[in-house]
Amino acid sequence: MRRERIRSLRAENLTHGFTSEAPVLREITMDLPFGKEVVLQGAPGSGKSLFLKILAGLITPNKGDVFYNEQPLKEMTFEEFAPLRTSTSVCFENGGLLMNKTLLENIQIGLLYNHQWRRERSDGLLKSLVTDFGIEKYLSMRPASVSSSVKKITGIIRSLVSTPQVIFLDDPSLGLGENEKKALKYWIEKYRQDGKEDELIVIASSDESLVRGLNCIRYVIEDGRIIPWSESTRSQVA
Amino acid sequence: MNSLWKLVDGIGEKVVGTIRYTVSIWTMVYLSLRTVFTNRKNQSFRELVKVISSQIYFTGFQALPLIGMLALIAGTLVIIQASSQLSKVGGGEMLGNLLVVLIIRELGPLITALVVVARSGTAVASELGNMKVNSEIEALESMGIDPLSYIVFPRLLGGIISVVCLALYFCVVALFGGFLVAQFLQPIAFSYYMESLAFAISLEDVMLFLVKNVFSGIVIFVICCYQGFQVKQSFTEVPQVTTKAVVNSIMYTVSFNSFVTLLVYVKHLKRLGII
């Protein structure tokens, strides 16, 4: 499948909740800046992950829409969105690994299925990622046999190995040790340095130790609305 | 009067609910086929074959011992009962006809469907329910893999192939294994038995066998996939959807089998000029 370049990504009047009386997100409008890392912060349950999944096109919002290249997602079929979608990747909070596949198969499945596995390039990148995160010995195991941090790392590697244009990371440092966090930071920085101006990483995380040091634009989700981060919002995030 | 309206209202609600449900499951069948055939170039055929073959292995191959045992018991009982009862009324030459009607048309498709629902239907519904809670379905979507083509279609196709093969296996074991076991209790000449069967089997029986089993294969697996996808957030929903999948699969399969049998007998009665 051929990937399509994403030139713009925008959310407009997004409102979503599990009950109509108390929406988690209220009329969020946001233009995501390419060439940057965007960090979404907020208290637990504030809707960071939900917003991330809506942006990735995994959840259809109750109201409003997400626009990829000014095309509204609600009007696109799965097949129409697929070339744009394969230019993105998502790392889920719980890893989102297929339980009946080994970790290696989990990492490769998307690229193999879409005929996007490039033998030399993908193999080389996979080897570097696996070595840096230290999960070589687990690759032949299934998710049920490994710890939650290894599952999480596998999810991170899966989202990086496809070299997407837009990466959505949902609480990527949750449950990781110090060395693994260092590796994660290194790879985020490396991705940004290697990347061109039209690449974007969106991270939903309230982990200060991860966010600190990243050259990112921070936002806070508070009472269902998104506001730029400031020192005064820090206590609410914590 | 009020209670009568409530009853009518309740029945109407059930009927509308059943129609909606039926439309939903057939829409799912249509969409999964459409996704696979309209999007052939963009997906890995090898990955699909892998999932289909593992589905056939779990649903078909692993069910062989259970189906074989049930077929042997059913075949033996039917052969012994049919031959002893028919010989009492001097209808021994009808043995083949009775066996074909009972085993190929009715018991084969029905028992196979029930075994597949119990073994594989439950497995599919709970597997998909757990995948939903674990964000596995979302993960597939995020990688550009359509769950309809990667999850539903292989299960449907694998399910149809398995059900048809298992039903065929059931009939073979019931007719020939049953014959061998029955020899110990009520000896029948093999040549006579084979001749009786050969004269009894018609193209109509083969068609009925295929229609019933293909329908069972589709309905069992699409209902179980559909129910699995109904799980929203919690693992506690998984047993509930699994139960619903089993109940609905049995209801649809048994209703369809009965309906087809009824149609065939109405046709026979018409041919005989009774109706």
Image (cartoon, coloured by chain):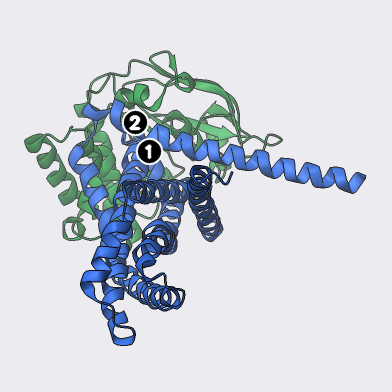
Chain colours: A green, B blue
Q: Quadrant of the N terminus of chain A?
A: top left
Taking the image as shown, residue A192 lies to the left or right of residue B159, namely left
Mark 1 vs mark 2, CA separation in Å: 7 Å
Task: Tell me: residue A111, above or below residue B73.
Answer: above
Taking the image as shown, residue B258 lies to the left or right of residue A196, namely right
The answer to whether residue A157 is seen in the rendering is yes
Question: In the rendered image, which quarter is residue B90 located in?
Answer: bottom left
Residue type of the residue flagged with mark 1: Leu
Residue type of the residue flagged with mark 2: Thr
Provide residue A27's location: percent of width, then percent of height.
Answer: 60, 24
Q: Residue at x 23, y 55 (%)?
A: A102
The answer to whether residue A234 is seen in the rendering is no
- Depth check: B272 or B242 in front? B272
- Depth check: A12 or A234 in front? A12
Q: CB atoms at circles 1 and 2 under 8 Å apart?
A: yes
Provide residue A42's location: percent of width, then percent of height.
Answer: 53, 39
Which residue lies under the disc numbered 2? B35
Q: Residue at x 29, y 57 (%)?
A: B199
Q: Residue furthest top?
A: A70
Provide residue A139's location: percent of width, then percent of height.
Answer: 19, 56
Task: Tell me: residue A84, above or below residue B246.
Answer: above
Q: Residue at x 17, y 60 (%)?
A: A137
Q: Which mark is residue A144?
A: none
For marks 1 and 2, the one nearer the N-term is 2
Which residue lies under the disc numbered 1? B148
